[in-house]
Image (tube, rainbow, N blue to C red):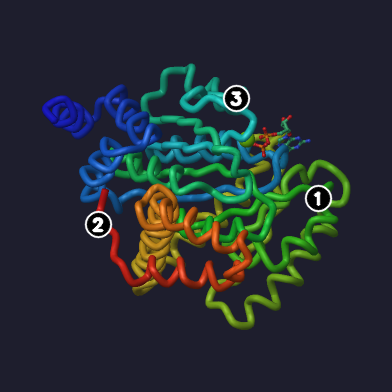
């Protein structure tokens, strides 16, 4: 496609509208999305990826704004992918006001992309990681992924970033128990945000205790920092420092390479599963055979579970020709 080649050339030259167009192509899916992903992949791997997760309203967007300012002060370029559960529109920037202001200032070193979460609030979508690939390939030094999440399935967020930050608030104290087996397990840094409110200290202590248990079998003891975006730079310095410490930790030996390799493996597995699942019911094998075999079930000549075994077996035996 000549058009795509042109777009990619502009992208490689640092053209922001071209980067936006490529992201839109990825969002729309289909063959074009695959082509874009194939083309950008060889350029990825330089950016430092940071995932910021936590319940809605915890202050993720506000923190990201502060972190962005701090990274900019170091001369680093920043890209943000924000999963925006409140917006049914993809591509519309519906971030916190102050993040929008950063953009409105016309700082070409900050690129914010907001994506709708496709109704799946519980897991950072593969789409977000794909878009992060574009920002990485675009040459952003730092790529931040914002995702709302408080459940256990969200643990696959660890495949999206070098560093996962879990943002909690003193009000969310009741959530700690349910988080134990989930996000707290994959968090590299925990921020107790809104520490200008009461209860922050005791909450931080509780999380410290949980992390001490984890530290017994991990190489990294996730720091628990208290933040207050209300206090701007001063209130978020502790988080910035913790991020730096984790980056240094990853630089030691093969840690970062290993982490990225297992993330890549997981992303590929998720891609295969989603692709097979999507094609399963459209394909000739299950589509047609299901109706025939289901008729035998309703006629009482076959148990539903026998039927399911038979169908699943036939899918396994007959490799599908690619559509
Ligand atoms: N008191 C207080 N409010 C905060 C703090 N950080 C964010 N907020 C407010 O909390 C609300 C939600 O913040 P937002 O960043 O949009 O949360 P998100 O949904 O996690 O992205 C906004 O009204 C913020 O102004 C903080 O440190 N202290
Ligand atoms: Mg937000």
Tell whether 197 sits left or right of 137. right
Neighbours of disc 1 within 10 Å: few (<14), some (14-19), many (20+): some
Frontmost residue, 286 versus 154? 286
Disc number lying in front (1 or 2): 2
Q: Which mark is residue 69?
A: none
Q: Mark 3 points at which residue?
A: 98
Disc number lying in front (1 or 3): 1
Image spot of residue 57 (x, y percent):
72, 37
- Residue name at image x 41 percent, y 37 percent: 78
Tell me the quarter of the image containing the N terminus.
top left
Frontmost residue, 91 versus 301? 301
Q: What element carries label 1?
A: helix
Up the image or down, 76 lies above or below 317; here it is above
Q: Is mark 2 on a helix, strand or loop?
A: loop
Looking at marks 1 and 2 on the same chain, the residue that comes earlier in the sequence is marked by: 1
Q: Mark 1 points at which residue?
A: 172
Tell whether 321 sits left or right of 217. left
Cα–Cα span, label 1 and label 2: 50 Å
Where's ligand 2: which quadrant? top right
């Amino acid at each position: 496609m000549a058009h795509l080649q042109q777009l990619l050339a502009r992208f490689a030259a640092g053209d922001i509208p071209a980067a936006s167009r490529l992201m839109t192509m990825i969002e729309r899916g289909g063959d074009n999305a695959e082509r874009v992903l194939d083309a950008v992949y060889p350029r990825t791997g330089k950016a430092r990826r940071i995932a910021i997760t936590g319940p809605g309203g915890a202050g993720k967007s506000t923190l990201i704004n502060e972190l962005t300012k701090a990274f900019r002060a170091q001369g680093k370029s920043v890209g943000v992918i924000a999963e925006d559960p409140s917006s049914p529109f993809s591509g519309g920037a519906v971030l916190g006001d102050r993040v929008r202001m950063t953009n409105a200032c016309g700082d070409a070193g900050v690129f914010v992309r907001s994506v709708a979460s496709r109704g799946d609030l519980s897991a950072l979508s593969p789409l977000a990681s794909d878009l992060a690939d574009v920002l990485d390939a675009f040459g952003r030094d730092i790529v931040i992924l914002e995702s709302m999440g408080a459940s256990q399935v969200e643990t696959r967020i660890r495949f999206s970033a070098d560093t996962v930050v879990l943002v909690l608030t003193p009000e969310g104290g009741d959530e700690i128990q349910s988080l134990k087996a989930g996000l707290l397990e994959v968090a590299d840094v925990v921020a107790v945000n809104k520490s200008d409110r009461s209860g922050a200290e005791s909450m931080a202590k509780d999380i410290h205790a949980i992390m001490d248990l984890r530290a017994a079998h991990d190489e990294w003891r996730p720091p628990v920092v208290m933040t207050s975006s209300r206090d701007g730079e001063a209130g978020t310095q502790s988080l910035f420092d913790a991020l730096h410490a984790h980056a240094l930790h990853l630089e030691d030996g093969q840690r970062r390479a290993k982490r990225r390799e297992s993330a890549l493996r997981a992303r590929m597995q998720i891609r295969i599963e989603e692709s097979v699942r999507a094609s399963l019911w459209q394909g000739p094998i299950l589509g047609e055979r299901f109706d025939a075999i289901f008729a035998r079930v309703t006629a009482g000549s076959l148990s539903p579970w026998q039927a399911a075994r038979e169908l699943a077996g036939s899918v396994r035996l007959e490799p599908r020709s690619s559509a």
